[in-house]
Image (tube, rainbow, N blue to C red):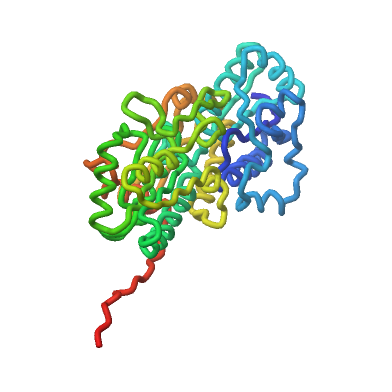
Amino acid sequence: MSKGNVLVGQSGGPTSVINSSLAGVIEGALSAPTIGRVFGMRYGIEGVLNDFLVDLGSESPAVLSGLRSTPGSALGSSRLKLKEEHFPAVLKQLQKYNIRYYFMIGGNDTMDTIHRVTKYANEHGHEMVGVGVPKTVDNDLHGTDHTPGYPSAARYVALSVLQAGVLARDMQKVDQFVIFQSIGRSAGWLPAAAGCARFGNDTPPHLILFPERPFNRDRFLRAVAATHEEHGFVSIVCGEGITNADGTPVSVSQTRDKFGNVEFGAMGGTSAAMMLHRMIADEFGWRGEFQVTESLPMCAADRGVKLDFDEAFACGQEAVRLATQGEGGVMVTMNRLNPTPEHYEIGFGTISLSEVANHERPMPDHFISDDGFGVTEAFHNYVAPLIGELPKYERLVAKRASL
């Protein structure tokens, strides 16, 4: 391929480390001999359609270095779903800026966008290589051990449930139950991370509800009653996308985004945590709390995992390496080379964009406990090296005083 320019963008929800991937792409592209200029699309594919590209090569080294620890999506994101009528305008822009290398950092829908754009360009005589950089806190991308952004978000969830669990234990005479809702539309990877906060049979979370398991109201309420009887309070974690046996969301949201996905926190519906709160309060008459974090785990750089930032950056650089060697139509993957958590190591691989776009990766059965309300040792071994060590908090022996 003749020398050409790079176009890079970010799409969908952010992660704490998405800008580290962007920095990896920029650094790799600026040093590649077959690449000329490096452009960023402002607000995703909308920046291409609106002719708003950013000259990333003009940014200072200090800014580019600082991106590696900056939350949010520095280029701005978009959830615009490309329609067939958009493609001629997109191609015109690609030709105008001589874009030969196309990178996007995102999830399933983003990989579909790269696949469709590069396919259209090549079919219309504009030679171009497209490579996807994985990103999603949901950790549901097919073909990779985990996605950049998940370790930091998983640590956020684990720390939140750990610390809220201490509070719930101490406040059990005021609030008999507490519910923490985690993001994750159809996969339970983030709710599962809360299981790392549990250091004994009596410590929260007591019950975890996964999108992979159909919700059964009666069974859930029986588990709540038994847990309260044993511990004096109940700590519950739920994925936002938990569904009833017939497939309807527990959240009863009717609002959908432009890709047809249910917006669980949107106006027009209630959250799963709110519905669970109502069930428990109506059944037992207890007072309780619920917390819905929404986008907070996506941007909490202060709880970010160094491993996550480093891997995100490396994925960006790997994408450039693949593209400049002519390997397009793929997403970068991370493969675990050593299964033991004490000797964690990854290597890079690839998976076709079309395969990623058409598959989601739920939690495997062997990561979910037999009763459906917890995680197994296998999951702990999987996630431990990703989130790092959690703090240990003291508790009083609370021996009753005597005179």
Is the residue 265 above or below the residue 355 in the image?
A: below
Can you say which quadrant of the picture contains the C terminus? bottom left
Which of 58 and 49 lies nearest the eye of the viewer? 49
Q: Residue at x 56, y 33 (%)?
A: 267
Residue 351 placement, left or right of 40: left
Vertical side of 145 occupied by 88: above or below: above
Residue at x 60% of width, y 22% of height:
81
Res 298 quadrant in image: top right
Q: Position of residue 32 (x, y in %)?
A: 65, 38
- The reply, left or right, for residue 281 in relation to residue 66 is left
Instruction: Name the residue at 57% across, 37% down.
Output: 13
User: Foreground: 154 or 398?
Assistant: 398
Up-down relation of residue 54 to residue 311 (above or below): above
Which quadrant of the figure has residue 76?
top right
Residue 144 image point, x, y percent:
42, 36
Residue 38 position within the rendered picture, expressed as x and y whole percent measured from the top left: 71, 36
Furthest residue toward bottom: 403
Image quadrant holding the N terminus, namely top right
What residue is drawn where x is 44% and y is 22%?
358
Q: Position of residue 302 (x, y in %)?
A: 56, 57
Is residue 292 in sight in this rendering?
yes
Total of numbered circles in the picture?
0
Closer to us: 124 or 303: 303
In this rendering, does residue 389 appear at all? Answer: no
| Quadrant hosting residue 239 | top left
